[in-house]
């Protein structure tokens, strides 16, 4: 702050804030995709954004962490805690990224694709949503289900193949 009480913004801080916001935005967008590799890349970008955020929180670069021999103003020395937290964040991000890569590779080996598919419960919810839309469109009194009691016998399980019985993944030959 200067003498008038105004906050002075450092150009580097504003630039880093925009970069952190961009990394978070792109990371969250990638994590909402169906491809496992995009999800992993989104997680990596979130980790990098978090590291930059922690480093920006440390204050202006180039300040000494400890000032000896004179009275210390609390705003003068650099805070070493954000740097330690950033190092910890790097290690955690690396470990989780390695774990996610192993899970993505295993999923690719089992299914032959890195696409995240809907499970049985997702199909059941989508079917119920479509049924309620049809009921409100027809405006029938009573709202009965044409197919019966509303509880499907197959629940989309015929669409879901179990390859464990054959010992191979889809697209994989012995």
Image (tube, rainbow, N blue to C red):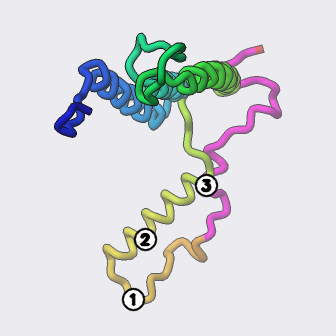
Q: Is residue 165 left or right of residue 130?
A: right
Mark earlier in primary sequence (1, 3): 3
- Mark 2 = which residue? 132
Q: Is residue 155 inside the magenta stretch? A: yes
* One can see residue 170 in this view: no
Q: Which residues are magenta?
A: 151-173
In the image, residue 125 sits, relative to residue 8, either above or below, namely: below
What is the C-alpha distance between the residues marked 1 and 3? 28 Å
- Give x and y (percent) for residue 149: 60, 76
Instruction: Assign a secondary structure to mark 3.
Output: helix
x, y percent for residue 50: 49, 28
Q: Point out the residue furthest to the top here.
A: 62
Image point (22%, 31%), residue name: 2
Contact between marks 2 and 1 (CB within 8 A): the answer is no
Furthest-bottom residue in view? 141
The residue indicated by pointer 3 is 121
Q: Quadrant of the C terminus?
A: top right
């Amino acid at each position: 702050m200067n003498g008038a009480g105004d906050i002075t913004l450092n150009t580097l801080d504003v630039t880093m804030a925009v970069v952190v916001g961009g990394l978070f935005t792109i990371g969250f967008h990638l994590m909402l995709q169906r491809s496992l590799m995009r999800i992993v890349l989104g997680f990596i970008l979130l980790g990098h954004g978090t590291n930059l955020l922690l480093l920006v929180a440390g204050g202006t670069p180039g300040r000494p962490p400890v000032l000896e021999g004179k009275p210390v103003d609390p705003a003068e020395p650099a805070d070493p805690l954000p740097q330690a937290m950033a190092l910890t964040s790097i290690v955690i991000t690396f470990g989780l990224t390695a774990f996610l890569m192993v899970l993505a590779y295993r999923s690719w080996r089992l299914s032959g694709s890195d696409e995240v598919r809907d499970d049985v419960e997702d199909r059941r919810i989508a079917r119920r949503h479509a049924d309620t839309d049809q009921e409100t469109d027809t405006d029938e009194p009573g709202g009965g289900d044409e197919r019966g009691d509303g509880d499907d016998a197959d629940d989309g399980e015929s669409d879901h193949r179990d390859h464990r019985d054959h010992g191979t993944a889809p697209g994989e030959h012995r």
